Image (cartoon, helix red, strand yellow):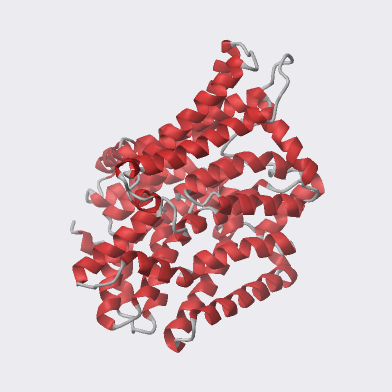
């Protein structure tokens, strides 16, 4: 069946998977149901052939070079955390931080700042920030849903706009590709930098984190989660199924071991250092490229894989050489670490697969074709942003969404005379929306994983915040497109509207306290 005849049917697999996940809370079965439906459509509605094609999608995605490295990275991180739990080092660090952190607000603020400081890679930032701060936020009865939200909303948005990050090369490369094709004589890097003020969703999402943390103006399902944690001490709901089930308390530190803070800090520092070095090395730093140029060409998957291996080697050496722990106990902790990440690995594998199904069904082309009839030069940035948000939500990948939209949206903006910088900013920031609230996004999965949160609870509590930032971002694109006022003024108005709306929702929309997004489908 030709791809162009799928039409709105192309949206069904991702939507079915998302709705089933939110309603049933059975992520694996729901994701596979979406994969099977999409595969069945692709093979002409033959359900048996669709089942076979579904397995082919899973195998293809799990065995792709980048994904294999990311899965190995996840297993190694699990092993490293298992050994860190065994050493007792995480508890020592948490005790040291708790002595300085006196309130729940300070614990949340520390998590937010740490997530932004590790700006060079969103995966590394999520892993490190979650691992370091989870014991601290638990001590102050911060819900795991809130921790996952902070991780999700301070990592990718920061990495996507940082001029030194693993995202830079991909984003600048997409801009350059279109400029070369259209004969536009402008610096792709300069345009990238100029687009940063127009990344309205990314900037508003970051601002919203600090507004929520500093004012305690939670609303919707997040308010219910925070009230549960503060009133009962339960950082997880009674029916929660945390994506990382093994905790530090599940692996006992031998009585003979005197836990030291550096048992935890050493492998984390090695992880960071090797990540930075590996990004520089794989990007051609050894042949004279500057660090920023090396990042543009870096092999991110290999870099974080090497870093995870180095982190494992470091904590293993500490356990054997200094803590004097028996190898049998170390082996047990490694296997506990593997168990810790088995479910996230399965979720990631199926999330990638359903993203591939949606791309085969050409969801992006369909959404763009529907949008085309609505476009004027003034409206184009807002239409691009909404299209990117829908596509990224359906396929669960910001980079995939960027790849779909750049060849369509940039030439269209160039032809219509719409500001290129604003159009490019709309693509790059709209693509981030799905990363934040789609259950099939790898970033969303990893935030749930390293916050040890229930994945569906994370999605339920984060969607209202993501939608709020997206609505105000859409308004900002409309204002910029139709009025042409300075972008700084638009940002200031958007932040004021964000703060005011957040206050209103927290104070006057209390009916949503106990309502999860999943319940709206019932």
Horizontally, residue 482 falls left or right of residue 208, namely left
Q: How many marks?
A: 0
Residue 219 appears in the picture as rendered: no
Rendering quarter of residue 472: bottom right
Position of 444 relative to 418 (above/below): above
Residue displayed at 34% across by 84% down: 377
- Can I make out residue 17 in this image? yes
In front of the other: 479 or 219: 479
- Residue with the most extreme front position: 288
Q: Looking at the picture, how far across and down is residue 471, in whole percent?
A: 53, 72
Q: Residue at x 31, y 69 (%)?
A: 368
Which image quadrant is residue 263 in?
top right
The image position of residue 317, as x and y in percent, is 55, 19
From this view, report whether residue 150 is shown above or below residue 307: below
Q: Residue at x 42, y 83 (%)?
A: 481
The C terminus lies in which quarter of the figure? bottom right
Q: Residue at x 48, y 49 (%)?
A: 122
Quadrant in which residue 384 is drawn: bottom left
Depth check, front residue: 256 or 165: 165
User: Residue placed farthest to the bottom in the image?
Assistant: 483
Q: Nearer the viewer, residue 477 or 23?
A: 477
Task: Give the quarter of the figure containing the N terminus.
Answer: bottom left
As drawn, 86 above or below 398: above
């Amino acid at each position: 069946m030709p791809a162009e005849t799928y039409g709105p049917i192309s949206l069904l697999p991702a939507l079915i998977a998302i709705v089933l996940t939110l309603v049933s809370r059975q992520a694996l079965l729901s994701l596979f149901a979406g994969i099977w439906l999409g595969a069945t459509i692709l093979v002409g509605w033959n359900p048996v052939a669709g089942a076979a094609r579904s397995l082919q999608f899973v195998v293809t995605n799990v065995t792709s070079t980048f994904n294999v490295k990311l899965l190995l990275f996840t297993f190694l991180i699990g092993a490293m955390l298992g050994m860190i739990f065994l050493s007792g080092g995480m508890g020592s660090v948490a005790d040291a931080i708790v002595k300085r952190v006196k309130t729940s607000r300070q614990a949340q603020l520390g998590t937010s700042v740490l997530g932004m400081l590790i700006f060079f890679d969103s995966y590394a930032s999520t892993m490190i920030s979650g691992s370091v701060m989870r014991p601290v936020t638990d001590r102050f009865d911060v819900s795991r849903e809130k921790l996952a939200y902070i991780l999700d909303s301070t990592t990718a948005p920061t990495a996507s706009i940082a001029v030194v990050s693993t995202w830079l090369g991909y984003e600048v490369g997409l801009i350059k590709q279109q400029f070369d094709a259209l004969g536009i004589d402008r610096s792709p890097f300069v345009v990238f930098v100029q687009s940063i003020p127009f990344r309205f969703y990314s900037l508003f999402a970051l601002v919203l984190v600090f507004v929520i943390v500093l004012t305690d103006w939670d609303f919707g399902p997040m308010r219910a989660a925070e009230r549960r944690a503060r009133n009962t001490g339960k950082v997880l709901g009674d029916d929660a199924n945390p994506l990382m089930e093994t905790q530090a308390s599940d692996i006992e530190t031998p009585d003979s071991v005197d836990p030291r803070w550096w048992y935890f800090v050493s492998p984390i520092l090695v992880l960071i250092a090797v990540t930075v070095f590996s990004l520089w090395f794989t990007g051609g730093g050894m042949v004279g490229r500057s660090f920023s140029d090396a990042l543009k060409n870096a092999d991110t998957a290999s870099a974080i894989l090497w870093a995870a291996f180095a982190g494992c080697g470091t904590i293993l050496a500490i356990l054997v050489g200094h803590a004097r722990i028996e190898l049998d106990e170390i082996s047990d902790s490694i296997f506990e670490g593997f168990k810790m990440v088995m479910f996230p690995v399965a979720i990631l594998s199926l999330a990638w697969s359903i993203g591939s199904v949606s791309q085969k069904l050409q969801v992006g082309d369909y959404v763009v074709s529907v949008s085309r009839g609505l476009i004027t030069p003034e409206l184009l940035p807002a239409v691009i942003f909404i299209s990117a948000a829908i596509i990224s939500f359906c396929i669960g990948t910001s980079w995939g969404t960027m790849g779909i939209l750049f060849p369509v949206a940039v030439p269209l903006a160039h032809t219509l005379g719409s500001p290129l910088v604003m159009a490019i900013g709309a693509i790059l920031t709209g693509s981030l929306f799905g990363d934040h609230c789609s259950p099939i996004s790898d970033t969303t999965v990893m935030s749930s994983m390293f916050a040890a949160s229930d994945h569906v609870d994370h999605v339920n509590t984060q969607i209202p915040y993501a939608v709020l930032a997206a609505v105000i971002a859409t308004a900002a694109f409309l204002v910029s497109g139709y009025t042409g006022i300075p972008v700084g003024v638009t940002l200031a108005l958007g932040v004021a509207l964000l703060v005011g709306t957040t206050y209103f929702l927290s104070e006057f929309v209390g009916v949503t306290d106990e309502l999860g997004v999943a319940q709206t489908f019932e």
